[in-house]
């Protein structure tokens, strides 16, 4: 098979959660273990950092990888889903896996794929582990896909576990209470492996403490170890001042400008502090350089990403209540005349509660990503109308974007939110057009 045939095989042969939802979710690790066994247990030949959480785990994974890369480590990074290119899922030092490497890995796995019929995600996880082991990375940052305990990535024994936060998402699979969701995420906590918790509540913190006690895993709350003093959002960068107890404040510049990164960066900094205490040479210069260049070094997109000006056009992959709240906080600090909101969602989210948060004075453009899991446009518009949101429907996000640009004033703001899959379908302008 050539590269396009290989991709077609992966996308058409294997069940994909991003396309069909819960039907693709495998509630045990047996397939992933079998795939890794066929490859000679690559997950056992690499050092890993495991990152889970409801929101922020992608940003935290990329920032960690960027800092480790800046510190001189050959760094693997596995994240999902991809935005524009399948190969974004598997990177080494910010470089995507090659097309030929994808072909070779799939050819090696094809016999066992035909035998056990794994999911798309199970196969891509095994591919990532094998590539990282083959390339002899110093460390690989591994982002969970969904949950933690039964996530395909949970066959690793990491040097550090990180849980960013817990909020309402994927309740049909992870549980109908925050405690149940937290228990699933806490499934990545391993015996004697330190764990960093980014944010927790009175409901979720006891779950983490108890799991860490059982596993004899040292637990640290980032928010209790390091404090955000203040921040400034300027010129598409985020300037943050942080401090530890009895230490002088330190300032960092982030090239990820979303204000919600003020929470994620505390998780990242505490994770790096833990690695330093474990003997990893990571100096202050590497931390600053990694945070300043995360997008450049790792290629992270879709997090308050500006893709146009006059009018300003922003993409954000916010897709649940907590994510939407964070985006609305940023909106309140973003100068604009009229807000144009392009929205598309998938069926298995808390859609009505998300819509209830959106501003009633925006002009709406309802659309959908081109996948079966997407909520039909007419159904989205009906729910939005019930929530007091007015606008029109469009078959695709790019048609919606053209419509918004046609009527928008140069001082207006066009925001695209609701799904990472919707964001992935936006036609990006050429670099010199931005």
Image (cartoon, rainbow, N blue to C red):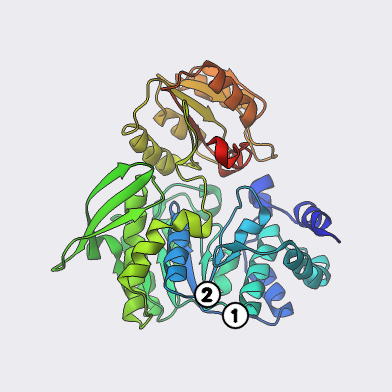
Secondary structure category for the residue under label 1: loop
Rendering coords of residue 309 (x, y %): 47, 30
In the orientation shown, which residue stands out farthest toward the left? Answer: 246
Q: Can you tell which quarter of the image residue 366 is in?
A: top right
Q: Quadrant of the N terminus?
A: bottom right
Pick the front one: 104 or 382: 104
> In the picture provided, is 365 more to the left or to the right than 290?
right
- Report the disc number at residue 83: none
Give whichever of 12, 334 is nearer the camera.
334
Q: Position of residue 51 (x, y in %)?
A: 47, 64
Q: Residue at x 34, y 45 (%)?
A: 259
| Residue at point 51%, 23% (across, down) | 384
Residue 53 appearing in the image:
no
Front in this rendered view, residue 16 or 247: 247
Q: Disc 1 and disc 2: Cα gap in Å?
A: 8 Å
Few, some or many C-alpha atoms within 10 Å of disc 2 (few <14, some 14-19, many ≥20)?
A: some
Residue at 80% x, 58% y: name it: 3
- 427 vs 245, left or right, is right
- The residue at the far right in this view is 1
* Residue to which mark 2 is pinned: 74
Q: Quadrant of residue 199?
A: bottom left
Q: Tag 1: Cα neighbours inside 10 Å, few (<14), some, or many (≥20)? A: some
Above or below 232: residue 357: above
Q: In the rendered image, is residue 392 in sight?
A: yes
Do the residues under discs 1 and 2 have CB atoms within 8 angstroms? Answer: yes
Residue 78: percent from left, percent from top: 57, 64
According to the image, label 1 marks what residue?
136
Q: Is residue 224 above or below residue 277?
A: above
């Amino acid at each position: 098979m050539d590269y396009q045939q290989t991709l077609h095989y992966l996308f058409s042969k294997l069940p994909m959660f991003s396309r069909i939802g819960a039907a693709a979710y495998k509630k045990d690790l047996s397939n992933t273990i079998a795939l890794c066994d066929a490859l000679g247990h690559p997950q056992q030949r690499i050092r890993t950092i495991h990152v889970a959480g409801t929101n922020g785990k992608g940003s935290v994974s990329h920032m960690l990888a960027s800092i480790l890369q800046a510190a001189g480590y050959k760094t693997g990074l596995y994240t999902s889903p991809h935005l524009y290119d399948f190969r974004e899922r598997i990177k080494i030092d910010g470089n995507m896996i090659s097309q030929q490497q994808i072909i070779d890995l799939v050819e090696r796995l094809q016999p066992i794929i035909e035998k056990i019929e794994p999911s798309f995600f199970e196969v891509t996880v095994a591919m990532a582990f094998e590539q990282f082991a083959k390339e002899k990375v110093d460390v690989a940052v591994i982002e969970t896909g969904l949950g933690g305990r039964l996530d395909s990535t949970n066959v690793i024994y990491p040097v550090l576990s990180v849980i960013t936060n817990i909020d309402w998402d994927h309740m049909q699979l992870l549980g109908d209470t925050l405690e149940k969701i937290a228990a699933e995420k806490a499934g990545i906590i391993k015996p004697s492996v330190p764990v960093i918790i980014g944010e927790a509540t009175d409901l979720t913190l006891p779950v983490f403490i108890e799991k860490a006690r059982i596993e004899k895993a040292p637990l640290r709350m980032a928010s209790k170890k390091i404090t955000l003093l203040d921040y400034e959002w300027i010129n598409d960068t985020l300037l943050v001042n942080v401090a530890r107890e009895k230490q002088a404040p330190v300032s960092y510049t982030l090239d990820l400008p979303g204000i919600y990164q003020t929470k994620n960066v505390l998780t990242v900094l505490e994770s790096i502090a833990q690695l330093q205490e474990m003997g990893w040479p990571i100096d202050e210069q590497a931390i600053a350089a990694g945070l300043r260049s995360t997008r450049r070094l790792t290629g992270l997109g879709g997090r308050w990403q500006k893709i146009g000006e006059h009018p300003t056009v922003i993409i954000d992959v916010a897709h649940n209540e907590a994510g939407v709240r964070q985006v609305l906080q940023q909106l309140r600090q973003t100068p604009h005349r009229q807000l144009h909101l392009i929205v598309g969602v998938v069926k298995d989210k808390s859609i009505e509660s998300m819509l209830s948060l959106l501003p009633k004075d925006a002009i709406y453009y309802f659309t959908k990503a081109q996948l079966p899991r997407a909520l039909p446009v007419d159904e989205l518009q009906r729910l939005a109308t019930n929530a007091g949101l007015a606008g029109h429907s469009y078959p695709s996000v790019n048609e919606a974007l053209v419509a918004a640009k046609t009527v928008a004033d140069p001082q207006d703001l066009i925001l695209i939110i609701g799904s990472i899959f919707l964001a992935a379908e936006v036609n990006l302008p050429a670099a010199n057009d931005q």
